[in-house]
Amino acid sequence: MIKRVILIVLDSVGIGQLPDAVDYGDDGSDTIGNIWRTRGHLYIPNMLSLGLGNIDDVNIREKTENPIGCFGKAAERSKGKDTTTGHWEICGIVLDKPFPVYPHGFPEDVIRAFEEAIGRPILGNIAASGTEIIKQLGQKHMQTGYPIVYTSADSVFQIAAHEDIIPVDQLYDMCLKARRILTGQHGVARVIARPFIGQPGNFQRTERRRDFSLKPPAPTLLDKLVSCGYSVAAVGKIEDIFAQQGITDKRHTTNNDDGIKATLDYMGQDFAGLIFTNLVDFDMLYGHRNDVEGYAKALEDFDAAIPALITSMKDDDMLIITADHGCDPTTPSTDHSREYIPILLYGRQIRSNVNIGVRSTYADIGATITDILKAGSLDNGRSFKNDIM
């Protein structure tokens, strides 16, 4: 009997465009496949051994004759292609309406309310790349002490501030004030703190980013597990994505390596339930910056960590490797892409070389976990437990 699931989300590692990708401006997006083709090679033998190349209709050159894991992919049923939507759907929540976006900046009444709440004006209020906007406005920010507010194609209200001008704790407090304002029709998925350091011409964003999400509108996989007495250990920004709900322990990490180490640490502990990890570097450092080489190297580095993860598994553990959306670094866009996500599963009680096919919703992952752990059922998703055990 499975007692614990290690669920690892490779943030933005999509595996091919969804049928409605053209509606989102993402026709041709295929994060892993396009990286492989553009670069000409990608050394990920461990994910291939689990069955990555055997997933239906994937554009990966290498298949494995007898994969040691189960494999498949899932479509996103929710409207949108952001981090919160993807993670929530994995955990059983399907959104009929996308979170609001602001390609021309936030309305005057929102900005006015935020300025009144923090007691000072803001700079920016445009849709922009985070690294570019601090290049443009960082010096003025340092001169005035006004925080930089910006957004992107995603449903985010981002606040950038130099750590020497607005200390990180004050920046977090500003984000909490913004979060209280951004509800209802302006309920963006996330308010994000974006601290940076350095001098004009050499600004660098730091690893003390924090996300402040809306609370999930209904019980999630995490809530179900906790209500059944299970432990839920959150690694990376999982605690932020779920607004701290349904979590019994947490490690806020700084990068992929840190996230893998924290996951291995939790795996060494003896408890039943879920270890839920988000590895954000793929998206934050490489996808949004169209850095194909950096993205590829991050994939290879994660792949190299898989043997340690497998070796650390207990006999009653199950490993799931998946994603939450795409962010194809080979396309002109620097935004998320509407893609299928891979599903790779492994465990000593899990069958090998099983194709679970193309799932109609990410929520099938959460439904399977609740089924295996006997934690009730979710509002969405269909379990594939009987296919893999």
Image: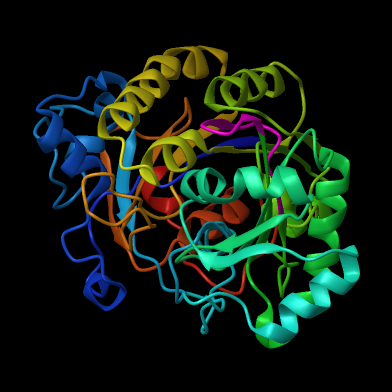
Closest to the observer: 3 or 331? 331
On screen, residue 4 versus residue 102, left or right, reads right
Q: Name the quarter where the N terminus is drawn.
A: top right
User: On the image, which quarter does residue 176 sit in?
Assistant: bottom right
Residue 251 screen position, x and y as percent: 75, 31
Q: Name the quarter where the C terminus is drawn.
A: top left
Identity of the residue drawn at 39% across and 57% down = 336
Residue 365 screen position, x and y as percent: 49, 54
Identity of the residue drawn at 21% across and 52% down = 331
* Residue 288 to residue 216: above or below: above
Res. 314 visible in picture: no
Closest to the observer: 375 or 135? 135
User: On the image, which quarter does residue 194 sit in?
Assistant: top right
Residue 224 screen position, x and y as percent: 74, 59
Identity of the residue drawn at 48% across and 18% down = 310
Res. 166 visible in picture: yes
How many labels sit on residues?
Answer: 0
Closest to the observer: 146 or 47? 146
Name the magenta segment's main secondary structure: strand
Q: Tell whether position 173 is magenta.
A: no
* Residue 178 to residue 225: above or below: below
On screen, residue 354 versus residue 85, left or right, reads left
Closest to the observer: 270 or 112? 112
On screen, residue 68 versus residue 59, left or right, reads right
The residues colored magenta run 197-211
* Residue 68 to residue 385: above or below: above
Residue 195 screen position, x and y as percent: 69, 40
Q: Tell whether position 206 is magenta.
A: yes
* Residue 180 to residue 159: above or below: below
Task: Identify the colour scheme used.
Answer: rainbow
